[in-house]
Image (spheres, rainbow, N blue to C red):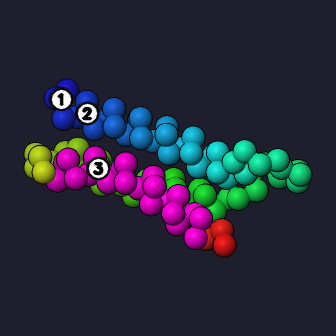
Amino acid sequence: MSKRKIIALGNLLISGSIALMISMFFAGGAISENYTDKTYVAPEFFIILVIWGIGAIFVLIQFFKDIIPYFVISLIITWISIPLGIIIGFSMDT
């Protein structure tokens, strides 16, 4: 396996786990107390995972190509998608 493929898989695992943790944190109500019996009081924050998934698909497409600039951009997209998903989640909340 080449370095590029190892970097892509490592990036997907690390950014994906961070995206999952952040979306679960916000969907569960963050640090506020949950007075309802619902597990997820703000499910609109799962949009973070959807947007990250789009970036992850872009990384997987670039996984099989040999174009380095697009590969770097695809890695950056997975990290940019997390704050973008948070911004969209907060705008959907109000």
Q: Main secondary structure of the magenta part?
A: helix
**Which quadrant holds residue 8?**
top left
- Say whether marks 3 and 2 touch (CB < 8 Å): no
Q: Position of residue 59 (x, y in %)?
A: 29, 49
What is the number of the mark on residue 94?
A: none
User: Which segment did they paint magenta?
Assistant: 70-91
Q: Amino acid at mark 1?
A: Lys
Q: Amino acid at mark 3?
A: Ile
Q: From the viewer's perspective, tell me whether residue 94 is left or right of residue 17.
A: right
Q: Secondary structure at mark 1?
A: helix
- What residue is shown with label 2? 7
Mark 2 crowd level (few <14, some 14–19, many ≥20, 10 Å Cα): few
Above or below — where is 53 with respect to 3?
below
Q: Earlier in the sequence, mark 3 or mark 2?
A: 2
- What residue is shown with label 3? 76
**Which quadrant holds residue 64?**
top left
Above or below — where is 37 with respect to 88?
above
Pick whichever, 70 or 25, lies toward us: 25
User: Magenta includes 79?
Assistant: yes
Q: Locate the C terminus by quadrant.
A: bottom right
Q: Residue at x 83, y 49 (%)?
A: 34
User: Label 3 vs label 1: CA separation?
Assistant: 17 Å
Q: Residue at x 66, y 68 (%)?
A: 93
What is the number of the mark on residue 3?
A: 1
Q: Position of residue 51 (x, y in %)?
A: 45, 59
Q: Earlier in the sequence, mark 3 or mark 1?
A: 1
Residue 28 appears in the figure: no
Q: Locate the N terminus by quadrant.
A: top left
